[in-house]
């Protein structure tokens, strides 16, 4: 398993274990098996959140995934996988992230995780909104600049206090923009709350990070933690022709949170054919492609089943030829934004 930089002073495995189905689609027993399997394969980090599990997200299940991870850690597994988690942020079940909400959210996560320290603490959503999850089609920046920057400065100070207290080791962002990340970097300077990562959707089907954000990540040593690197399973080919396998994410969410369309079907078909032509497994191609990017990147694999995780892990270490990477870019030019 390759490792890549995590910010300027740390490392992370090229595959990170995602846990968002732990507690709904994935039982606690299977969740523990996945964590064992990941650690044995050389994965060094897992990613969770106080919002998880999903499919569906409910008020009653908030924090359940952290509890499942905590139960695994408490069974003598502390240190086998380092833990990243997230502050919920604005949404149906929580308000804005502030300097006042951060300490309480961290303490609650630590209790569920049965831990004294969180290795990477992330803010799940910017207070000002995000263009992720198909909001890019109507995205319009808004809000008072001075108020936004004051909130960021206050939160930076709160995070620095948490590092000093020893409750968190490092800080990252999620569903963030280039402008937002740049402001966090400017306000943090060389302090302990300098962001080391940004967790955004990134895959062959979702390449918003490839221009302005790529330049910022490259020059400022920010690591991309790519969620949905297989586009919620679309890139496996299992949904081709409108198929909906029993127990799959699409059987619960037919539109895959706005990702499914006839245009996606055609785009995936082109990538599947590309993988076939080059004799590469399409799942392994999609994951290895992330390592061809100019910035450091780790793929968050959220597998519903142990067998799915096992298959993804077998692609670790694959290096795509320059010819195949160029061919991927040609497919991207033909289908630049399929969802």
Image (spheres, rainbow, N blue to C red):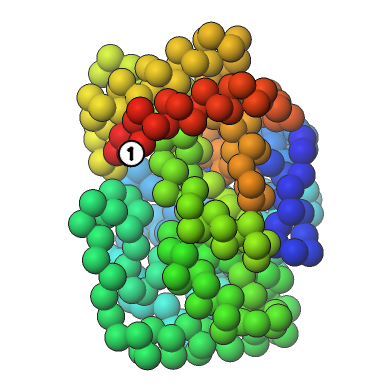
From the viewer's perspective, is residue 246 above or below residue 227?
Answer: above
Q: Residue at x 49, y 16 (%)?
A: 274
Query: Could you say where residue 56 lies in the image, as x and y percent from the top left?
Result: 32, 46
- Nearer-the-camera pick, 12 or 267: 267
Query: Could you say where residue 331 lies in the image, as x and y percent from the top left?
Result: 42, 26
From the viewer's perspective, is residue 287 above or below residue 68?
Answer: above
- Nearer-the-camera pick, 136 or 122: 136
From the viewer's perspective, is residue 150 above or below residue 280?
Answer: below
Q: Residue at x 31, y 20 (%)?
A: 266
- Left or right, 162 with respect to 101, comes to right
Q: Quadrant of residue 142?
A: bottom left
Q: Quadrant of residue 337?
A: top left
Query: Could you say where residue 68 lies in the image, as x and y percent from the top left?
Result: 56, 50
Report helix, strand or loop for mark 1: loop
- Nearer-the-camera pick, 288 or 26: 288
- Left or right, 122 with respect to 261, comes to right
Would you name the residue on which mark 1 appears?
A: 337
Q: Quadrant of residue 62?
A: bottom left
Query: Could you say where residue 234 lies in the image, as x and y percent from the top left?
Result: 39, 27
- Residue 191 visible to an observer of this rendering: yes
Q: Residue at x 52, y 34 (%)?
A: 303
Q: Residue at x 26, y 18 (%)?
A: 242
Quadrant occupied by the N terminus: top right
């Amino acid at each position: 398993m390759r490792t890549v930089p995590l910010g300027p002073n740390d490392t992370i495995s090229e595959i990170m274990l995602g846990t968002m189905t732990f507690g709904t689609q994935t039982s606690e027993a299977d969740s523990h098996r996945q964590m064992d399997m990941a650690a044995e394969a050389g994965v060094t980090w897992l990613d969770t959140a106080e919002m998880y599990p999903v499919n569906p997200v409910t008020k009653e299940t908030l924090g359940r995934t952290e509890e499942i991870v905590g139960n695994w850690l408490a069974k003598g597994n502390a240190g086998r996988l380092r833990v990243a988690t997230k502050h919920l942020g604005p949404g149906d079940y929580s308000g804005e992230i502030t300097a006042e909400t951060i300490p309480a959210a961290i303490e609650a996560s630590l209790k569920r995780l049965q831990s004294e320290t969180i290795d990477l603490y992330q803010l799940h959503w910017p207070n000002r909104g995000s263009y992720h999850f198909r909001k890019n089609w109507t995205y319009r920046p808004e809000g008072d600049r001075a108020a936004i920057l004051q909130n960021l400065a206050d939160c930076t100070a709160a995070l620095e206090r948490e590092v000093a207290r020893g409750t968190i080791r490092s800080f990252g962002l999620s569903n963030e923009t280039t402008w937002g990340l740049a402001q966090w970097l400017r306000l943090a300077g060389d302090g302990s709350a300098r962001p080391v990562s940004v967790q955004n959707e990134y895959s062959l089907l979702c390449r918003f990070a490839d221009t302005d954000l790529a330049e910022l990540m490259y020059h400022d040593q920010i690591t991309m933690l790519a969620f949905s690197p297989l586009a919620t399973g679309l890139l496996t080919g299992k949904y081709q022709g409108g198929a909906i396998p029993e127990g799959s994410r699409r059987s619960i969410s037919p539109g895959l949170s706005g990702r499914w369309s006839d245009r996606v079907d055609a785009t995936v078909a082109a990538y599947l054919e590309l993988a076939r032509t080059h004799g590469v497994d399409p799942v392994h191609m999609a994951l290895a492609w992330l390592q061809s990017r100019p910035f450091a990147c780790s793929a968050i694999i959220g597998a519903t089943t142990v067998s799915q995780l096992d298959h993804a892990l077998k692609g670790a270490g694959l290096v795509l030829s320059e010819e195949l990477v160029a061919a991927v870019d040609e497919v991207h030019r033909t289908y630049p934004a399929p969802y």
